[in-house]
Amino acid sequence: MADETLFESERQRSRTDIAGVLRSLATALENDGPVTLEDGAQSIDIDPPATPTFEIEVERESGKCSLELELEWNEHEEGENVSAAAEGESAESDDTGAEPAQSLGRFEVFRDRASEWRWRLVHRNGNIIATGGEGYTSKQNALKGMRSVMQNAPDADVVSE
């Protein structure tokens, strides 16, 4: 079977934006769930297995340097799942006929430098939109705080002074 590119994104970004994208990717991998990659109208969900091959390559060619990071796994390994959608293509719907909501951000739970657990809401461009504001002693408590915000404030009023 010929090679098939399922998703590709290439554009100039600031180092801060790149770090945000890598941080979001690292958090998604760490949480053992699917990873969503998005750029404009295209998106793809991947679910790498627990131990894919990880390659880091730095090249210099004709005075130009590149850093490539690659995860690789066999399509039939446990956990692997890939689904792509582009603008105009509809995602598979559930029995109700409703399509899944497309979020512009994702919640991340992570350990800070003081080894406390924190949560944050990150836009798909890597910008941090909101944080829990405090460190938690356990990941479970950080998740509990994050879920509380998700459940209790979906339609919260905005008050301006």
Image (tube, rainbow, N blue to C red):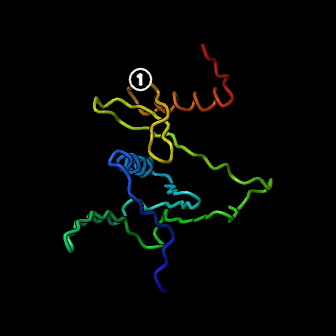
Residue density around tag 1, few if under 14, some if 14–19, many if 20 or more, within 10 Å: few
Residue 109 place in picture, x, y as percent: 44, 38
Question: Which residue is situated farthest in the bottom direction here?
Answer: 1
- Of the pair 34 and 127, the residue shown nearer to us: 127
Residue 46 placement, left or right of 90:
left
The amino acid at mark 1 is Glu
- Of the pair 86 and 120, the residue shown nearer to us: 86
Residue 158: which quarter of the image?
A: top right
Task: Give the residue displayed 50% in from the left and 47% down from the top.
Answer: 124
Q: Is residue 157 above or below residue 20?
A: above
- The quarter in which the C terminus is drawn is top right
Task: Give the residue displayed 35% in from the left and 47% down from the top.
Answer: 19
Residue 73 placement, left or right of 46:
left
Q: Is residue 69 above or below residue 136?
A: below
Q: Is residue 2 above or below residue 27?
A: below
Residue 35 place in picture, x, y as percent: 49, 55
Task: Give the residue displayed 68% in from the left and 61% down from the top.
Answer: 91
Residue 69 place in picture, x, y as percent: 32, 62
Task: Give the residue displayed 76% in from the left and 53% down from the top.
Answer: 98
Question: Which residue is situated farthest in the top direction here?
Answer: 161
Q: Is residue 85 above or below residue 129?
A: below
Q: How many marks?
A: 1
- Of the pair 51 and 114, the residue shown nearer to us: 114
Which secondary structure, mark 1?
loop
Residue 42 place in picture, x, y as percent: 57, 62
Which residue, given by chain and number where applicable, does mark 1 sit on? 134
